[in-house]
Image (cartoon, rainbow, N blue to C red):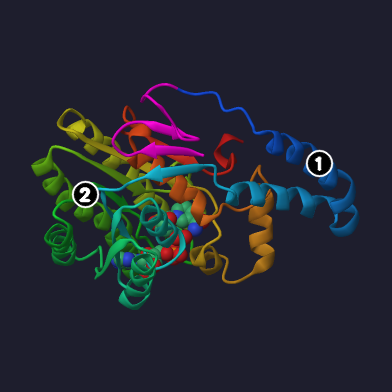
Amino acid sequence: MRTFNSSSNILINGKLFPHGVTPVLSPSPFAKWFKIHSFWFEIFFVPAIKGCSFASHKHLNDHAMSKQVKYDFRDTVALVTGAAQGMGLATAKAFGEAGASVVLADVNIGAVQAAADEIIKNGGKAIAVKCDVANEQQVKAMIEKTVATFGKLDVAYNNAGINTLEIEIADLSRTDYDRIISINQNGVWFCMQYEIRQMLKQSSGVIVNCSSLAGFVGARGRAAYSASKYAVIGMTKSAALEYAARGIRVNAVCPGMFETPMADFITDGNKAVLKEMTKAAPMGRLGQPEEIADAVLWLCSDGSSYVTGEALWVDGGFLSQ
Ligand SMILES: NC(=O)c1ccc[n+]([C@@H]2O[C@H](COP(=O)([O-])OP(=O)(O)OC[C@H]3O[C@@H](n4cnc5c(N)ncnc54)[C@H](O)[C@@H]3O)[C@@H](O)[C@H]2O)c1
């Protein structure tokens, strides 16, 4: 088991490796046995029962869900916006499991309260905050509540975002355009402003913003969404330069197609469309919310201490095509 301590080192099977040393992992005898036997089982038996393509996708999904990496975020205060469902919820839970004090913020207070209660029930520390990230006063209050409750803010994942159904730019209404920009773009700006003001007082902090593949390439029928996600990358890189020498790192994650309520929304519940999108991904499957959580936690850990201004593709190879 690998553990990234948020303050320095890597712990593997009880042995501590100094930060910067990359240990070679040798599999246990059981792991070797299992690798050989599960390989033949999948090659000969599973395809016979369920069909070849299902078997290989199942293998990939199992691999995605069997986590090898554990993080240690004890003594760390972590804020996640848009934490009621999807990737925000998965990331908030991952921070909770890693020992962080978690602030779960969302417009949907019922859902974040339930998620915070769950973290507390499992022995963790968490609060739920009702916050519309497009409302500057509510963002200010969210940071004040974080500091009043836990005394500081160490890491923040600015994840809250919305999408629209497909509409060509000539038909896009001013109202829909403004709504997307106000949440996806202005929301990230407001959050960064108040987070960075607090982090400057501490001379430390890490921010991860949520962009998208649509922050690198155009998205047909989603011009406002794409514009907002390009903007997130621009703000991330600018802020990274501004605060690099003052102890604050700022990065972005750019998810490919992930299996969340948003994916259901943009495909309008049409499973055939979802299947086509799945086929377009080189890994032949959608991303799981926990796989974004892994990327965010790595970017917030000291495992990425020399990484800032990065816009990290987490897309199963999609943009490399
Ligand atoms: N799902 C994907 O395939 C995909 C791909 C690329 C990027 N993204 C981005 O990832 C992020 C999370 O996406 P998801 O798929 O988990 O979405 P989701 O719709 O499942 O969850 C988004 C969460 O954000 C919250 N939210 C919406 N508006 C808000 C606001 N104004 N203030 C506070 N909270 C608000 C919602 O209540 C919800 O809990 C978004 O920024 C999205 O644009 C998603």
Residue 207 x/y as whole percent = 28, 44
Crowdedness of circle 1 by 10 Å Cα count: few (<14), some, many (20+)? Answer: few
* The disc label shown at residue 187, or none: none
Q: Which residue is mark 2?
A: 192
x 42%, y 21%: residue: 21
x 26%, y 58%: residue: 187
Relative side of 258 to 197, left or right: right
Residue 265 x/y as whole percent = 52, 69
Specify which label sits upstream in the sequence, 1 or 2.
1
Amino acid on which the number 2 mark rests in the picture: Met
Q: Is residue 56 magenta?
A: no
For label 1, the SS is helix
Above or below for 27 versus 92: above
Q: Nearer the viewer, residue 303 or 237?
A: 303
Q: Is residue 173 visible?
A: no
Q: Which residues are magenta?
A: 1-21
Q: Which residue is mark 1?
A: 37
